[in-house]
Amino acid sequence: MENVKIAIIGAGIGGLACALECEKLGVIPDVYERDNSVGWIWPSISYWPSVFYRNIGDPIDHLKKDYDIDMLPLNECKTIIMKSPEQEVKIQGKLGYFMARGKGDESKEIQLLRKLKKGTAIHYNSLMDFKKLSSEYDYVAVATGRDSEARELNVWEDEGVMRVFGGVALGSFHDETAVMYLNTEYAGSGYARITPFSPTKAIVGLYDDRHDEFDTERLFAKFLDYEKLNKLEFLYKLRTPPFTTGRVKKFKVGNILLVGRAAGLTERFLGVGGPEAVMSGVLAARAMINGEDYDEMVKPLQEHIENVSAFRKAIEKFENKDFDRLLSILGTPGIKQAAYNLPINFTDLIGSILKLIEK
């Protein structure tokens, strides 16, 4: 189907992965991006935890082998420190990857953009109506990173909102170490984090699910004060739009295919969805060009996301004593070793059990 006309809305990692696979299959798509360039307007670091991906193995190796997508991490994560009010756990091993986001040379978006041929047109500053495009193209892949299109198609199911406040800080950091803070006083049943760009610069963020959107700046200051981080020098701080979470009932409606977060493929425990955005983008291209069943192709990704997201349901009512107990259990030597270093898919197994318990 080399003559098929394809439009892709969104030049994030899902949209660019879709465009790249279209090229490999002999189709040059049109990509529409509402910004004036590729990449988030604020730099960030996303964490791809290996414990979430025991079902596929190393996520970067998996993308290379099964999706022909070669991505370079900013750093490998070798240490995770988790802190609650009365407990601290340090875990070491091959724990995943730190991936750069934004407009910098090392970001995932720029890496994918560089792989595209010159024939693929990216139409910047283009805020497109996906329904209008669906009448002009054979297929439209929606990779906007929003839920609005799925809502308009009546396939979105809400699962809550996460409110985010943070910034880029200068200080002394270990560039292979992530720190996670669990404390209901400032994060509800969410969390705060430090994720490094380098030994001298890091993302410091708060992800809260219980408080008002306009209370996050105060809570962020409370987090910094409580954890004795208030002497960090910030290059900037910002409040991002609330991050709605949910799932979709269908991934394909007519000739419209939903990709990445637009398809609800972001887990609701830590907010990880980068690998699924790339994978669903590639699968969308294969489905559109090869005539395959996109819903069936993406269903395993959604099942995995829902299993991981079951952890979020389990901790929504946690108080600090519950987080202390959780870290105490995770710190038990046998459990810590098994959960993070043995090749057993604990995440899907425990997530499946939690889902059954909820029913």
Image: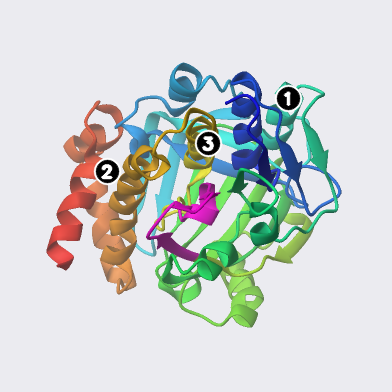
Residue 229: x %, y % from top left: 62, 59
The answer for how far apart the CA atoms under marks 3 and 1 are is: 18 Å
In which quadrant of the rendered image does the N terminus lie?
top right
Look at the image and give the residue range highlighted in magenta. Answer: 245-264
The earlier-in-sequence mark between 3 and 1 is: 1
Residue 347: mark in rendering: 2
The earlier-in-sequence mark between 2 and 1 is: 1
Residue 116: mark in rendering: 1
Outermost residue toward the top in this view = 65
Q: Are marks 3 and 1 in contact (CB under 8 Å)?
A: no
Q: Residue at x 61, y 43 (%)?
A: 138
The answer for how far apart the CA atoms under marks 3 and 2 are is: 31 Å
Number of on-image labels: 3
Q: Quadrant of residue 315?
A: bottom left
User: How did the renderer colour the structure?
Assistant: rainbow
Q: Image check: 207 left or right of 235?
A: left
Q: Residue at x 14, y 59 (%)?
A: 356
User: Quick one: 85 or 246, which is closer to the camera?
Assistant: 246
Q: Are marks 2 and 1 in contact (CB under 8 Å)?
A: no
Q: Image check: 130 left or right of 151?
A: right
The kind of residue on which mark 3 rests is: Met
The residue pinned by badge 3 equals 288
